[in-house]
Image: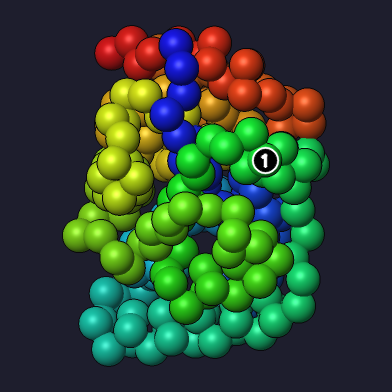
Amino acid sequence: MAVAAVLWDMDGTLLDSEKLWDIGVRELAEELGGRMSDTLRHALIGADGPTAVRILFEGLGLPPDPAAMTAAGVWLERRVTELMAGPIPWRPGAQEVLAGLRAAGLPSALVTNTKRTLTELCLETLGRDMFDVSVCGDEVDYGKPAPDPYLRAARLLGVDPGECVAVEDSPTGSAAALAAGCRVLVVPCEIAVPHRPGLTFRESLIGLTVEELGLLPAELI
């Protein structure tokens, strides 16, 4: 089946930026008087900002005070902005495959749960000309794992989600892409993604081609 567009996740898929988020959320946990377990950290991967703060407060046993949670979100954004001030490392093969698919004329969208202000910092590394459109977590009613970000990206590109391949690294992101009806390629990064119908797995993006993307099966559930 021909591929109408590729919809790219950002953190952990194209950029090795989850490690920067790891620094930020662990420091925030200490700032809040707690300590983050690996289990709690894994629960945050792929979540949008407000959801991540809510999960963090729950995991640390803190009362869900709206003012405190808002302040924590501001603190985290400021810290991650500092961490993303310079070039951000790419995931293996990501830069080459992104440029190759772009050169082949295949439409691309960046689809991330990260808010627009931080995504703009990442685009300094990625290159804005690599994408026809971008959709951020604060630009939809519901972020991943809801399908909204992927549905919005397909709509902006003027294509059917079922004719798109979404490339993801997390359970949250892959669930969102499946719910949108996309074909989904999973390249795990920080945590394992459970196998389920509709997901195709690859160890890395190294050597990925347009032809291989066209062979991905349609969503099966």
Quadrant hosting residue 125: bottom right
Quarter the C terminus occupies: top left
Residue 125 left/right relative to 56:
right
Q: Is residue 107 above or below residue 113?
A: above
Task: Looking at the picture, tell me which residue is in the foreground, 61 or 17.
Answer: 17
Image coordinates of residue 101 in percent, x first then y, are 64, 36
Q: Is residue 98 visible?
A: yes
Amino acid type shown at disc 1: Ala
Farthest-out residue, left: 141
Dividing the image into 4 quarters, which one contains the N terminus? Answer: top left
**Above or below, comparing residue 124 to residue 194 in the picture:** below
Decide if residue 90 is on the left or right side of residue 173.
Answer: right
Residue at 54% x, 87% y is 78
State the residue at coordinates (24%, 82%): 66
- Residue 24: tell me if it is visible: no
Name the one closer to the observer, 135 or 17: 135
Toward the viewer: 122 or 22?
122
Crowding at mark 1 (Cα within 10 Å: few <14, some 14-19, many 20+): few
Residue in front for this viewpoint, 105 or 187: 105
Q: Which residue is mark 1?
A: 103
Where's residue 72, x and y in %? 43, 83
Query: Percent x, y for residue 91?
Result: 74, 47
